Image (tube, grey):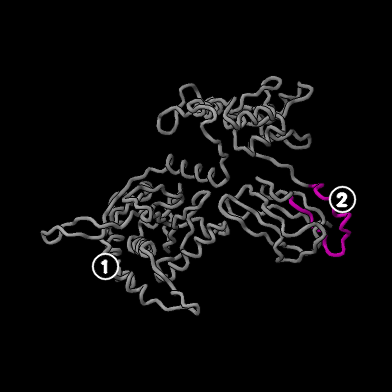
Amino acid sequence: MPINILMPALSPTMEKGNLAKWLKKEGDKVKSGDVIAEIETDKATMEVEAVDEGTIAKILVAEGTQDVAVNAVIAVLAADGEDVKAASSGAGADKPKPAPAAEAPAPKPAAAAPAPAAASAAKAPAAAPAPQPAAAQSNGARVFSSPLARRLAKDAGIELGRINGSGPHGRVVAADVEKAKSGQGLKPAAAAAGAPAGATGAIGAPAMSDQQILGLYEQGAYESVPHDSMRRTIAQRLTAATNSMPTFYLTVNCDLGKLSSAREEINAAAGKDKDGKPLYKLSVNDFVIKAMAIALQKIPEANVSWTEAAMLRHKHSDIGVAVALPFGLITPIIRQAEIKSISAISNEMKELAARAKAKKLKPNEYQGGASSVSNLGMFGIKDFTAVINPPQSSILAVGTGEERAVVRNGQIVAATIMSVTLSCDHRAIDGALGAELITAFKKLIENPVMMVV
């Protein structure tokens, strides 16, 4: 019997992915463990291994296809001894049809009505001889649209309810979606969501539609670059964090005198590998990661994640480190950083950053974590505030180390000072607790010998 190869869920939150590349072709024999394809998520590109043995009878989803739903059939495998042609001819017979959340399911005669309201909704269009396919908006209203228009809108990331339909009875057709991509024919966001007049955004100001924004600029004076999946995910997660997470900020200045001296001595004493290269080269950020990890152990009440039911108090300090990519941002995580040496943290961070830039990280290498570090010091930034990455409850924004005038023993002297700002989720961390955490961090940075005892 033919075996369906399904689109895998590469993380607990994954709902769809892009089939980046097939590494096997139709007619190829595969065995369990063979890498057959590469799947691209919003953060990484991952290899997919075969579970069963057999021959690839039919590839149903071409490489390069985007937004393939989890558990959709992407290929059919003929088991050992099975007729490949027969398996290929029956391929996709039970292939699940794409079912985006925006589409209304077609009524099934044999299905029992889940509720009276649902039953009446199913009967309503029965009077019409040929009901048009409709998509459901978040407020329950229906938007009539063609299948092609729905697919184009989904690929472009445009909500159907925001598009002015030009077809019969306001039906959205493919041409309407093409216009919407350039900002034409779009309804204001509040109207699309069915919000009452005067609805406002999260900060009390009316949200501007794409059309309104485009109207502020002269045609031809800009280039419209469509958002990729990573940029959309970053926007969604950080907007949600900003809107739902009450955040406060604490800033301290750290004297890097002792750390700079220790770092110089440690790097000078580093052993060499067979090629004559140092076994490690510590950066200030490596010390920052270690200090934050130990500080969370010293102040365990701050090493937490908020949930509606309970506070999750973490046993280890898993520290995310923001890595800038040409196409976005990702925070690979140093697990159990409190028990690792600074040199081990340094080498692991270099390896994670390299794989992050190649989009080769696994979901468990960038999801979760207790806190994060974001360092813009290399750009000469003195201080800044960072947005917390849920479900974490804090993030440390690190500025540059620079010479500043300080007072010591009544004398003005020059010292290398680094400003750091801790962002805290007030649901999980109160002001005094946040102050304890950043004070513990400051003591460790200013006395790095305490990190090894």
Query: Hey, which residue is sitting farthest left in the picture?
Result: 410
- Quadrant of the rendering where the C terminus is positioned: bottom left
Q: Residues within 10 Å of mark 2 (few under 14, many from 20)?
A: few
Magenta segment boundaries in residue numbering: 73-94
Image vertical order of residue 162 relative to residue 352, above or below: above
Image location (x, y in percent) of residue 268: 36, 75
Q: Which residue is mark 1?
A: 258
Using the rendered image of the protein, determine whether residue 249 is visible from the camera's viewpoint. Answer: yes
Identify the residue at image location x=41%, y=69%: 281
| First-in-chain label (2 vs 1) | 2
Q: Nearer the viewer, residue 403 or 101?
A: 403
Identify the residue at image location x=26%, y=60%: 416
Q: Which residue is mark 2?
A: 89
Q: Nearer the viewer, residue 262 or 296?
A: 262
Using the rendered image of the protein, determine whether residue 433 is visible from the camera's viewpoint. Answer: no
Q: Nearer the viewer, residue 333 or 355?
A: 355
Identify the residue at image location x=53%, y=57%: 357
The answer to which image quadrant residue 122 occupies is top right
Q: Residue 80 magenta-drawn?
A: yes
Q: Residue 247 magenta-drawn?
A: no
Image vertical order of residue 326 relative to residue 283, above or below: above
